[in-house]
């Protein structure tokens, strides 16, 4: 199955998931960094020319050293000082971490960034992009060699994912039904996604799902399948919010 | 406990942890305070158990997501990579780099042969049959180089030009070394092509110009930085070969793990090569074009060669033996990427 998340098990014995960064987000971050690098090299070049007037040749030499450092070590410097982020990555909320989930070290950073020279072949990062598309953890060649991944850090707050629910459906749902965690999550996933589906397709999918719930809880078939599922969702989440969850939620398996 | 009770009871800790892991100055100050680290540890662990609890009790998904993202960010800070003290740089040159060279002796020798072999061949060819030489490298190009060295370096040149050329050598040569290294990931082929190409070209130029009146000018120019520069290109090629063969020859590892293991060695090789090239650029910028007598330049070049033979040949073998004496049970002492213990490889040094 294609998955954009990567589970990490911590020494604390719990598992959390990282969301792997998409190719487009990485591309955007790269574009920002490219712009910053270009502007930095340009400004420093002008500065050298102005400050070192008569010694212009020496200034040119220094400028070439700076250009070299910016070309090859811009990412290393930032990834080391900003905990696996460059400026572009920070703006996009991306971070480089090891595949096992901990922060990258100096050699990891050098490795993944030197290998940009291979990833950007033949121009426009074609090799790197293909590698990202064809590897399970979205790694370009530099990531594969260094054992790193790029993850999307999300700062979410809870309580802001309430789905749009038609007020007419908020009443009259079935009473006294207790769902297991998986049944509830399946229902919730559907309700959260329903508005992004084409109505006919949505009804087709809902039909499949609703049939399962109807059979499980012996509910009569009435109205559209989508409405049935939404009603069930509303009713069961009301129940959950007023009752203790610990035991009433039932076993997950 | 209902989700609402749970949130009410735990929210204070989450907000505090959120603040500590933030990138803001406030977060940084909180983390670096005297009891900040232990507070962070406590908050991180309790957030971990909150996440486990929220999952087990089937609390709302957005709450689980929130806790998941919070723990992920805290985890990253909590298991921070160790700092990189300056002492490590010294250790790199005295121990780690020579050790890596010795451990990858096969690749280093292959890199040297792939470069110096064609170079010697082209020099021989230029003495034996110039017509064939021109088939490989255009005559006009060789004559262009010859013209550059007609004048000699009797009077040296102005210092600002020295600085400029040094900057150029740093950017150009180290850039080539890095490209030569990264091209190696394509099964080593990229590195082989780049070293062969350079060996052939430099061999042709040296062979051709050496026979002309400008010959001594060229030789006295390149003898100073040549040993460092050319050996470094060979080393970066060796690093590329190591990378490429890590993909081909996997032993009993998965291909990606084999690559990772190879890359850990390869990156050390190429960083060592870069340091040699930095030295070479300084020599090439300031010493090689100076007006010093040729005898001085040739002596210097000889000393550099001797140093490299000692450093890469003798010293690396000694360091390797000493390393084996410390850890005899682990056949080949080597870096272990992603070992459960963080950065184990450095701790053995």
Image (tube, coloured by chain):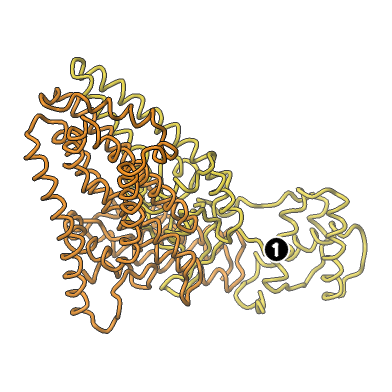
Q: Nearer the viewer, residue A58 or B313?
A: B313
Indicate the chain on which mark 1 is placed: A
Colour orange, chain: B
Image vertical order of residue B333 relative to residue B60, above or below: below
Asked whether residue B188 appears in the rendered view, the answer is: yes
- Going 87% across and 56% down the picture, which residue do you hit? A203
Image vertical order of residue B89 relative to residue A92, above or below: below
Asked whether residue B24 appears in the rendered view, the answer is: no
- Going 78% across and 55% down the picture, which residue do you hit? A170
Q: Which residue is mark 1?
A: A237
Name the image quarter holding the C terminus of chain A: bottom right
Q: Is residue B199 left or right of residue A230?
A: left
Horizontal and vertical percent position of residue B152: 17, 27
Q: Residues within 10 Å of mark 1 (few under 14, many from 20)?
A: some
Q: Secondary structure at mark 1?
A: helix
Image vertical order of residue A75 relative to residue B113, above or below: above
**Rendered shade, chain A:** yellow
- Going 62% across and 72% down the picture, which residue do you hit? A245
Q: Is residue B202 left or right of residue A217?
A: left
- Going 77% across and 72% down the picture, which residue do you hit? A177
The extreme front residue here reads: B128
Q: Nearer the viewer, residue B290 or B169?
A: B290
Name the image quarter holding the N terminus of chain A: bottom right
Horizontal and vertical percent position of residue B349: 21, 69
Instruction: Please tell me in which quadrant of the rendered image residue B105 appears.
Output: bottom left
Horizontal and vertical percent position of residue A96: 44, 53
């Amino acid at each position: 199955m294609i998955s954009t998340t990567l589970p990490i098990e911590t020494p604390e014995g719990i598992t959390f998931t990282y969301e792997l960064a998409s190719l487009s987000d990485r591309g955007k971050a790269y574009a920002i960094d490219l712009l910053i690098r270009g502007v930095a090299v340009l400004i420093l070049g002008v500065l050298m020319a102005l400050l070192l007037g008569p010694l212009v040749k020496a200034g040119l030499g220094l400028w070439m050293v700076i250009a070299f450092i910016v070309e090859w070590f811009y990412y290393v410097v930032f990834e080391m000082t900003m905990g696996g982020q460059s400026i572009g990555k920070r703006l996009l909320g991306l971070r480089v971490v090891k595949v096992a989930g901990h922060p990258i070290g100096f050699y990891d950073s050098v490795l993944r960034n030197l290998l940009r020279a291979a990833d950007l072949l033949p121009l426009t990062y074609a090799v790197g992009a293909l590698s990202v598309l064809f590897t399970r953890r979205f790694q370009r060649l530099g990531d594969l060699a260094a054992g790193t991944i790029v993850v999307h850090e999300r700062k979410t707050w809870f309580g802001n994912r309430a789905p749009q629910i038609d007020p007419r459906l908020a009443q009259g749902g079935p009473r006294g039904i207790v769902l297991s965690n998986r049944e509830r999550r399946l229902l919730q996933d559907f309700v959260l996604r329903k508005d992004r589906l084409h109505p006919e397709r949505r009804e087709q999918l809902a039909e499949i799902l609703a049939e399962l719930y109807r059979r499980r809880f012996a509910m009569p078939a009435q109205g559209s399948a989508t409405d049935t599922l939404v009603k069930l969702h509303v009713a069961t989440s009301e129940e959950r919010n007023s009752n203790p969850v610990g035991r009433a939620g039932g076993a997950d398996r | 406990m209902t989700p609402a009770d749970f949130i009410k009871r735990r929210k204070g800790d989450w907000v505090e942890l959120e603040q500590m892991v933030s990138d803001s100055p406030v977060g940084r100050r909180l983390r670096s305070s005297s009891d900040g680290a232990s507070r962070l540890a406590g908050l991180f662990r309790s957030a971990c158990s909150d996440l486990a609890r929220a999952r087990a009790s089937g609390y709302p998904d957005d709450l689980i997501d929130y806790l998941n993202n919070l723990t992920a960010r805290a985890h990253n800070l909590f298991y921070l990579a160790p700092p990189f003290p300056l002492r490590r740089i010294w250790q790199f040159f005295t121990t780690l780099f020579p050790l890596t060279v010795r451990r990858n002796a096969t690749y280093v020798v292959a890199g040297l042969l792939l470069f110096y072999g064609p170079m010697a061949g082209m020099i021989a060819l230029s003495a034996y049959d110039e017509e064939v030489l021109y088939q490989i490298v255009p005559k006009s190009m060789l004559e262009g180089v010859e013209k550059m060295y007609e004048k000699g370096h009797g009077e040296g040149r102005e210092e600002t030009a020295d600085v400029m050329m040094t900057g150029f050598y740093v950017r150009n040569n180290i850039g080539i070394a890095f490209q030569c290294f990264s091209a190696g990931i394509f099964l080593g082929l990229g590195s082989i092509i780049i070293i062969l190409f350079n060996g052939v070209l430099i061999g042709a130029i040296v062979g051709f110009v050496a026979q002309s009146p400008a010959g001594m000018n060229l030789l006295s120019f390149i003898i100073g930085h040549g040993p460092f520069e050319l050996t470094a290109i060979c080393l970066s090629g060796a690093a590329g070969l190591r990378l490429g063969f890590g993909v081909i020859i996997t032993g009993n590892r998965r291909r990606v793990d084999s690559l990772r293991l190879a890359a850990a060695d390869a990156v050390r090789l190429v960083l060592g090569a870069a340091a040699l090239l930095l030295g070479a650029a300084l020599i090439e910028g300031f010493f090689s074009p100076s007006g010093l007598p040729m005898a001085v330049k040739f002596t210097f070049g000889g000393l550099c060669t001797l140093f490299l033979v000692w450093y890469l040949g003798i010293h690396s073998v000694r360091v390797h033996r000493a390393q084996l004496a410390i850890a005899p049970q682990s056949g080949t002492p080597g870096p272990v990427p992603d070992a459960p213990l963080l950065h184990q490889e450095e701790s053995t040094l």
